[in-house]
Image (spheres, rainbow, N blue to C red):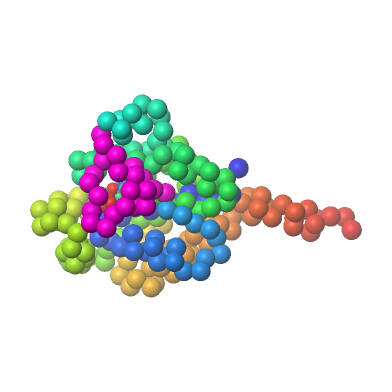
Amino acid sequence: MYTGTLFIISAPSGAGKSSLIRAYLQQNNSYPAKVSISHTTREPRPGEQHGEHYYFVNSKQFESLIDKQAFVEYAQVFDHYYGTSIAEIDQSLLKGVNVFLDIDWQGAQQVRKKMPFAKSIFILPPSLPELENRLIKRGQDSQSVIQKRMQKAKAEISHYNEYDYIIINDDFDISLKALSSIITAASLEQPKQAMIHQPLFADLLSPN
Ligand code: 5GP
């Protein structure tokens, strides 16, 4: 049984998803957690490392992994493949580690079908102009890529009602508290607690 929780976290690029996840992992948490590292065929951005941000592979390598059924989900986003390998998440969930899938709505749909116990969280910007501002300030993408991301944002946002939780990321600290609360609540669910604390329950329920 998985004693870790699988969290699907989606958002239009620039909503603050990666910063929130990073901040969550840096704070002192009661529950161990990690971000699943996806495979992608897109080029690394400046500062991105293979095996840390993504496993950067070419299309041929990605397609061979599809053939081997190595992915719990994969999708084409912005003309590139992105996918989550089963090996990347399975061992962590078995060991009681919470796993975050930073994936888009297409991937989220596939994961929900295969792993209906996953909790899904959608992070939204407070407005479209603010989203564009954040993308410009991030300085990672050219103007044409930013325009493409803005067009994609509305399509992504239209899937908000498929998610269990919504966080509107206006104030970062409030959003971080909201994210932490969701993770805490999921980690405290009865079946997981009963499994993790088996000796305690045996002791508490012992006849004398
Ligand atoms: P970026 O290129 O900015 O890192 O990511 C672009 C989009 O791809 C984001 O919306 C991100 O959530 C999504 N993405 C990243 N990894 C995966 C994955 O493994 N599967 C799917 N379906 N989407 C992913």
Tell me where residue 75 appears, x and y as whole percent: 30, 39
Residue at the extreme right: 208
Residue at the extreme top: 67
> Quick check: is 35 in the magenta stretch?
no
> Where 83 sits versus 122, above or below?
above
Q: Quadrant of residue 65?
A: top left
Q: Is residue 12 left or right of residue 119?
A: left
Tell me where residue 174 appears, x and y as whole percent: 39, 72
Q: Is residue 139 left or right of residue 92?
A: left
> Where 92 sits versus 186, above or below?
above
The stretch of residues the image draws in magenta is 36-59
> Which image quarter is the N terminus in?
top right
The structure residue drawn at horizontal position 55% and vertical position 60%, both measured from the top left corner, is 31
Q: Is residue 84 left or right of residue 125?
A: right
Tell me where residue 9 appears, x and y as whole percent: 38, 53
Q: Is residue 135 left or right of residue 48?
A: left
Tell me where residue 10 appears, x and y as whole percent: 34, 52
The structure residue drawn at horizontal position 25% and vertical position 50%, both measured from the top left corner, is 44
- 137 or 8, which is in the foreground? 137
The structure residue drawn at horizontal position 43% and vertical position 42%, both measured from the top left corner, is 112
Q: Is residue 185 visible?
A: no
Q: Is residue 152 visible?
A: yes
Q: Quadrant of residue 61?
A: top left
- 129 or 26, which is in the foreground? 26
> Where 183 sits versus 54, above or below?
below
Q: What secondary structure predominates along the stretch shown in magenta?
A: loop
> Which image quarter is the C terminus in?
bottom right
The structure residue drawn at horizontal position 25% and vertical position 34%, both measured from the top left corner, is 59
> Quick check: is 56 in the magenta stretch?
yes
